Image (cartoon, rainbow, N blue to C red):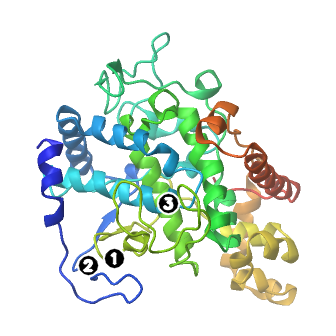
Amino acid sequence: MKFSSVLMSAAAIGMAAVGINAQQNQPACSSIYTRKEILSLTSSEWNLVKSILAAMQRDGWFRWFAYLHNQWFGSIHGNSQFFPFHRRFVYEWERVGKMYNSGYIQPYWDEMRDYRVPASSPVLTSNWVGGNGRSGDRCVVNGVQANWMMTYPNNHCFSRNFGNNGNPSSWYSPETIQNFIQRDTTMTQFRPDIEYTLHGVVHINIGGDMYQGYSPNDWIFMLHHANLDRLWWQWQQNGHLWTMDGPNAGGGSISLDSSMPYFNEPVRSVMQLGYGNMCFQYASNPISRRSLDPDMDQRLAAALPKDVLAEWFPETAKTEIANITDNIVNSVNSAIAEVSEIINSKPFNPIPYPARLTESWIKMHGFDTAEVRKVENQSRKLIDILNKAKYRSPY
């Protein structure tokens, strides 16, 4: 299953039509598969993934995707091609995996749930993707890519070099990401809010191959970008399904008809899940082993004044719990009282500031340092507000 033969068959991949979307002008998918959070995979699903990853490494696919990402690096970062290109890129990876076994579905890693102490995540253990590279040569010796030798851009051991001397600093909390999803109204806002925060700090703090332009050498790349794509889809469903504005690769303004780098397909072809080749969805059920209750909206509404809630979390402010009056609060049933008791029973644990993007990362991507720091500082302002209100995060 060499990548050359699969590329020859790319045009043959298609989906049966059950309808046409007017904006996209593509057929609705006849069936839709679900991308799951990695820790919710069954043993048989994980064993299938592991076997296919080994085969893709053997046949040169890790090298190929690392090469593509590195070659087009300047065109797919720092502009509005970031989300559409990476949706198409992860889908292409998944499509190749399905050539080995149609049951292959790319999982995602909900990294925000592990934001406080990333290195303690069960995802970064030998049972899953493995941990930090060993002292000295930074070669990874456990997990799904244990002891692999990579061949792009040269022969080297597969490596990771966790930030902060092996104990990565906090990355971005679910509350911060929810703030972006609820407040941002344009891609010009949403793209840098994600790219300068969660996107960058995960790459940087995993380090090694993940720090480079050829980061798809590390399968965490696919887990990470599937998660970022999931967040984009959440934002799209918040009234921004066809929102695509801001700069295009190479200058000018992007539109739905702009061509994605390398793929030479219009941006509109990946905008709506469930149409064309985007025949997947993301699992919406809580991850049982990591689910938390009560939910974040209830906690935010209980902690923040209504005007502050409306400014930073406008969608949450519209919910019933955010608008109940004191009289109603006094008469609600015992279930609500139990929720409040749960919220306040645990000691207050402030949300830590997340890691910042390094100067070398900013330079590597050609970002405007002042714009990066503006986004970072705005996120820290939110953290200050939440901590001052003694908001108790469930995460």
| Residue 59 horizontal/vertical position (percent) | 17, 36
Residue 312 relative to residue 264: left or right = right
Element type where label 2 sits in the image: loop
- The local secondary structure at tag 3 comes to helix
Q: Nearer the viewer, residue 291 or 232?
A: 232
Q: CA distance from mark 2 to mark 3?
A: 21 Å
Q: Is residue 362 above or below residue 229?
A: above
Q: CA distance from mark 2 to mark 1?
A: 5 Å
Q: Tell me the amino acid under the disc marked 1.
A: Gly
Residue at 21% x, 49% y is 44
Q: Position of residue 389 (x, y in %)?
A: 86, 60
- Residue 279 image point, x, y percent: 29, 71
Q: Amino acid at mark 3?
A: Phe
Q: Which residue does the image show at 47% across and 55% down from the upper left?
A: 227
Separation (CA) of disc 3 from disc 1: 17 Å
- Where 220 sits versus 311, above or below? above
Give the mark, 3 or 1, whose residue is nearer the N terminus. Answer: 3
Please give the label number shown on residue 274. Answer: 1
Residue 307 is drawn in which quadrant? bottom right
- Which residue is found at the position 17% from the left and 80% from the top? 16
| Mark 2 or mark 3, earlier in chain | 2
Which amino acid type corresponds to the residue marked 2 in the rendered image?
Cys
| Residue 29 numbered tag | 2
Q: Is residue 285 left or right of residue 301?
A: left
